[in-house]
Amino acid sequence: MFSIIMHLTMPAVFAATDGRTLDECFQAALRRSEIIGTQTELIAQAEERYRQAKGAIFPTINGVASYLVQAAPAATAATQAPGEQTTAKLTATQPIFHGMKEYAGILQQNLLVTSAMSNKVQAAASLYSDVATNFYSILQLEQDIRDVTNEINIDSKRISDLNARVRIGRSRPSEVLTVKSAVDTLVATNDATRGQLLALREAFAFLTGFDRNMPILETETLTLPSPGAVEPYLQSIEERPDVKAARDSLYAVEKNVTIARAGHFPQIDVTGDYWFKRPGISQDQHWDAQIIGTIPIFAGGIVNSQVREAASQERASELNLARLRRLADQEIRSDYDNFTADLNQVTSLTRATQSALENYQAQTSDYKLGLVTNLDVLTAITSSQESQRALDKSRYLTKLDYIKLQIATARRPKQEELKP
C-alpha cells in the first residue's frame, strides 16, 4: 500500500507561536470535559469495588462487648448465671468455602475496571471527533473568507479597469454595474460566513476553554494513505474501545451466573473468639473456635430464579456486543467510503480549478482584444474562484473524514494521550 501526501495545509494568517494545534485543543478539551472527569471517577469507583471484592476472602475481626441485666437467678445458679453479666471479646471469622462466589466476584470487578477504562477512551474518542470537527470547520470557514475576499479584490480591480475603459468609450457603464453587483453579493456571502464562524468559535471556547478568538493552525502536512481495500480497516473492530468495554462487560455479567449458583452450595466458615471478660463458670475460658457449615435446603426458589436472571443478563449482554460490532462495521465502512470519495473529489477539483484558472486568464486576454464580453470574463472569474473554494473545502473535509476513519478504527486517540 503506497501513500499519497496531500499538501492540504493552508497559509496561516498568524505565526505558529500565536495559534493552537489540534492536539493542543484536544488536550485542553480533555482537561475541561465533565464527561471525561465523570469517566475518571467511574474508574476510581470500579477500582474500589474490586478492592471490596478482594476483601471478601480475608478474615474479619470484630470487637464485641455487652452488659446484661436479668432476673436474679436461684441461689444455686447465681455463680453460673449471675444477674448482671459483662462480656468483652474479639471475634475472628475466616470464610473457607462459599461456592467460589468470592473469586468470581473478584474477577467480575476486575473486568468492570477494564470496561470503565475502555469507556473513558471511548468518551475521549467522541470528544476528539467533536474537537476535530470544530477545528477543521473553523479553518475551512476562515479559508473561505480569504477566498471570497480574494475574489472581491479581483473584482474590485476589474471595476477600476472597467471605469478606465468607460472613460475612453471602450466599455459600457452597465458592465461596471454588473461587476459591482457581483461584489455586493460576495460581501453578503462573507457576512453570512462570518456569522457561521462566530457560532463555531463559541463552540470552540466551550470545548477548549480558550478565548474564542484564539487563532488555530496546522503545523505540519497531513499524510493521507491510499485507502486500498476496506477489509484491513474492519480488522480493528475488536480494538475499538466501545467494543472492548462491551466485551469486558459481557465477561463480567457471565460471573453473575457463578455467583448465583453459589447459593446451591454449602458455606463453611471458621470462627474464633478471644474473651477478655466472661461471666459465670466460663470466666476462666479465654478462647474458643468452631467450624460452621451451612447447607441450603429450601429458599422458596429464590436461588434458581437468580440463576435464570443472571443467564438472561448474559444473553442481553451478548446481544449488546453483537449490536456494537455491527454498528462498528457500518461506521467503518461509511467513514471509509467518505474518505475515498473525498480523495477522488480533491483530485477532480484540483484539475477543475486549474482549468478554470486557465479559462479566466484566456478570457481576460480575449476581452482585451474585444473577442469576448465582460459577462464572459465575470463568469470565468466566478467559476475560477468557486472551484478554488470548493477545492479548499474538500481538502479540509478530507482531513476531517480521515481523522474520523482513524477514530472509528481505534487509531485515535491513544490511551497515552489521555493525560491527567
Image (cartoon, grey):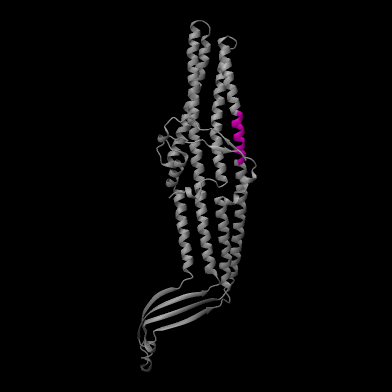
What residue range appears in magenta?
336-348
Residue at x 48% of width, y 6% of height: 167
Query: Is 239 included in the stretch rendered in magenta?
Result: no
Residue 378, position as x, y percentages in the image = 55, 17
Task: State whether residue 241 is above or below residue 51.
Answer: above
Res 15 → quadrant: top left
Residue at x 48% of width, y 41% of height: 131
Q: For the N terminus, which image quadrant?
A: top right
Task: State whether residue 386 is above or below residue 400.
Answer: above
Residue 22, position as x, y percentages in the image = 47, 39
Which secondary structure is most common in the magenta stretch? Answer: helix
Task: State whether residue 25 is above or below residue 107.
Answer: above
The count of marks equals 0
Residue 48, position as x, y percentages in the image = 45, 61
- Please indicate whether residue 167 sits to the left or right of residue 330 in the image: left
- Please indicate whether residue 383 sits to the left or right of residue 187 in the image: right
Residue 139, position as x, y percentages in the image = 48, 33
User: Can residue 103 be seen in the rendering of this structure?
Assistant: yes
Residue at x 47% of width, y 32% of height: 197
Q: Nearer the viewer, residue 282 or 252?
A: 252
Q: Nearer the viewer, residue 239 or 97?
A: 239
User: Can residue 214 be seen in the rendering of this structure?
Assistant: no
Task: State whether residue 266 is above or below residue 142.
Answer: below
Res 80 → quadrant: bottom left
Residue at x 55% of width, y 26% of height: 388
**From this viewpoint, which residue is outermost toward the bottom?**
76
**From this viewpoint, which residue is outermost toward the front?**
2
